[in-house]
Amino acid sequence: MRRSLAYALIPVTPAFWSANYYVAAKAPGEIEPHALALLRWTFALSVMLPFAWSAFRRHGMPSRRDWIDSFLLGGLGMWICGAFVYYGGRSTSALNIGLMYALSPVLIAVFSALWLKERLNLRQALGVCLAFMGVVWIVTRGAPLAIASIRWVEGDLWIAVAVLCWTAYSLLLRQRTSRLDPFARLSLITACGVLLLIPLTWLESQLVPGWHITGEGLWLALIAALLPGFGAYQAYSFMQAQLGAARTGVVLYLGPLYAGLMGWLLLDQAIGSFHFIGAALILPGVYLVTMPEAKA
């Protein structure tokens, strides 16, 4: 039953994450990156805590190792993969962001096989390649040779660090097992991420001229908390516990498809033929990686 639910979450999780594209597009001028990350995870934590507390009472309070792991994972997942992406999005293009994030599932799949000893068979390797090609086709708008003329800027460094840290987060979440259930564990990781973000946001407020948060910025933080925060991270943690790091990581390839739909619905961005061609590569690729193994 739990494994069936994990498979059902495959198309849902990247839909939650796609809300972050909207938030990132609207955030400049409304809220600063660290403030957005802090409010996003503080709001998400307030939703998690009532449910997590009952889980802690059933299974016991976190151990010393749980706290250490949670501060490490909170730094990777809530601080760097939160604020750094918003910083990078201010100076780099969606093409660069899409291409760099397309590498993350590849890295997760490779290191899952090498480090976590998760088996990656020929069918799954083909699926990863197909999905990667689909992402490249979408983010280059059907002109993959445009990669050769990409202009790299400072924001790309922020995104590159975030991509590497997301890969590390995914692998460590799988490798560093815990007796806590996925919901309680993510709540603890989120709490540690919030504790790390508090002084960093204060420092940002002292260093950034004209630092402010508007009412629109608060709404954006709330959206980021409920969908790409609470919804996507909880689903991702649950899926990874059931399916493994490599299979779960590949759902990130669905991101550009949902981003295109989100842009069309909310940001008046057109959907082009390159979206459909990319989808024709991504969807079979994701299926090949995540489909259940045939029973003997």
Image (cartoon, rainbow, N blue to C red):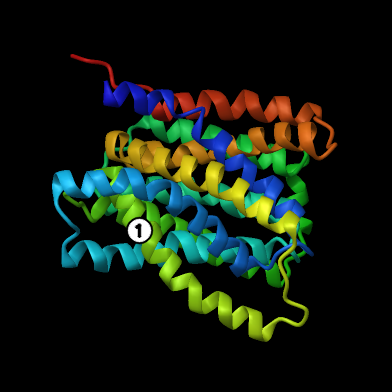
What amino acid does circle 1 point to?
A: Ile
Where does residue 191 sit, x and y in percent of width and height?
38, 61
The crowding category of the residue bearing disc 1, from other C-alpha atoms within 10 Å (few below 14, some 14 to 19, many at least 20), is many
Residue 159 at least partly seen: no
Q: Which of 289 and 180 is in front in this view?
A: 180
Report whether 14 appears left or right of 233: right
The residue wearing badge 1 is: 189
Q: In this view, does 280 lie above or below 66?
A: above
Residue 244 at least partly seen: yes
Quarter in which the C terminus is drawn: top left
Q: What element carries label 1?
A: helix
Q: Nearer the viewer, residue 23 or 53?
A: 53
Where does residue 39 sit, x and y in percent of width and height?
56, 60
Q: Which residue is depicted at the point 55% across and 56% down?
A: 40
Q: Which residue is depicted at the point 29% across and 51% down?
A: 185
Where does residue 19 sit, x and y in percent of width and height?
63, 42
Where does residue 78 sit, x and y in percent of width and height?
47, 60
Q: Which residue is depicted at the point 17% across and 67% down?
A: 64
Q: In which quarter of the image is residue 77?
A: bottom left
Report whether 166 appears left or right of 270: left
